[in-house]
Image (cartoon, helix red, strand yellow):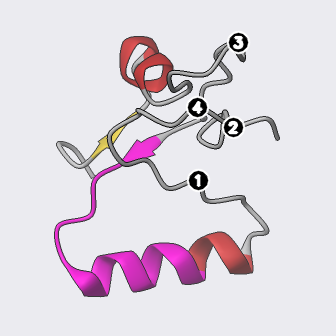
Amino acid sequence: GAPNVSTATAVREQHGHDESMHPCAPPDVVVWPQAVGQVQELAALCHRCRVPMVPFGTGTGLEGGVNAVQ
């Protein structure tokens, strides 16, 4: 829950692009897990619900790998 989850447009847009030429494709939600166990639970939930999980680091990539195209 909040403050570790956001559906705010500005946050989603920040996480929906990198330094590439590709247009922004924001995710539906941004999550900031605070512990390894939370990452494990989140990955299991995404797998079970067939929801793609896109990791985001610093956003400096040049390939568009953080774009949530699905």
> Where residue 67 appears, x then y in whole percent?
66, 34
Camera-near label (4 vs 1) is 4
Looking at the image, do the residues carrying marks 4 and 1 touch, with CB atoms under 8 Å apart?
no
Which residue position is annotated with label 1? 54
The picture places residue 40, in percent across and down from the top left corner, at 42, 85
* Disc 1 and disc 2 in contact, CB within 8 angstroms: yes
Residue stretch rendered in magenta on the structure: 30-44
Q: As drawn, which residue projects farthest toward the front? A: 62
Q: How far apart are marks 1 and 2 (CA)?
A: 7 Å
Would you say 17 lies left or right of 8 here? Answer: right
For marks 3 and 4 on the same chain, the one whose residue lies earlier in the sequence = 3
Question: Which secondary structure is most common in the magenta stretch?
Answer: helix
User: 19 left or right of 5?
Assistant: right
Q: List the residue tagged with mark 3.
A: 23
Task: Say whether residue 20 is left or right of residue 42.
Answer: right
Q: Is 6 one of the magenta-colored residues?
A: no
Residue kind at label 1, given as amino acid type: Val
